[in-house]
Amino acid sequence: QKCKVGNSEWVFPSPTGGPMSPDSVLHMLHRVLKRAGLPKVRFHDLRHTFATLALQNGVDVKTVSGMLGHFSAGFTLDTYAHVTTSAKREAAKTMGNILSGAV
């Protein structure tokens, strides 16, 4: 992609060399998803998925919060952190190891 765009600061520049319009990006995304046989998604869905997966896989909340441009880590947790059954199990296992002296 870098060879295609040359010295542009944008990964996917518009035909005029500037940033692509959100409508254009969304149209391209929907075309790609359709070709792949996947359902349409909104950008918010992608943002939500990114934040949830990052938090569930150990990226610290301050980092995720900063990447999302949130004003506080608490807001990020309230909005995106969905504690799953497996996360609860892992937390219980970790605490059990700590309390039993295994860690």
Image (spheres, helix red, strand yellow):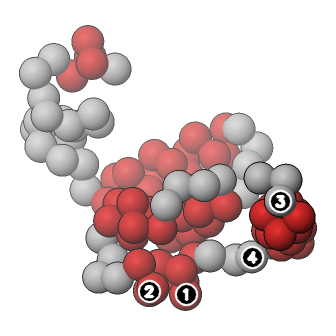
Residue 101 found in image quarter: bottom right
Q: In this view, does 84 lie above or below 72?
A: above
Q: Which of 95 and 48 is in front in this view?
A: 95
The N terminus appears in which quarter of the rendering? top left
- Look at the numbered disc 2 and give the secondary structure of its residue: helix
Mark 4 → mark 2, Cα distance in angstroms: 15 Å
Q: Which residue is drawn at 39% across and 60% down?
A: 63
Q: Which residue, given by chain and number where applicable, does mark 2 sit on?
A: 75
> Quick check: marks 2 and 3 in contact, CB under 8 Å?
no
Q: Which residue, given by chain and number where applicable, does mark 4 sit on?
A: 83
N-terminal-most mark, 1 or 4: 1
Q: Which residue, given by chain and number where applicable, does mark 3 sit on?
A: 101
User: Would residue 41 appear left or right of 20 to someone viewing this image?
Assistant: right
N-terminal-most mark, 3 or 4: 4
- Look at the numbered disc 1 and give the secondary structure of its residue: helix
Q: Do we see residue 57 in this rendering? A: yes
Residue 23 found in image quarter: bottom left
User: Would residue 44 appear left or right of 85 to someone viewing this image?
Assistant: left
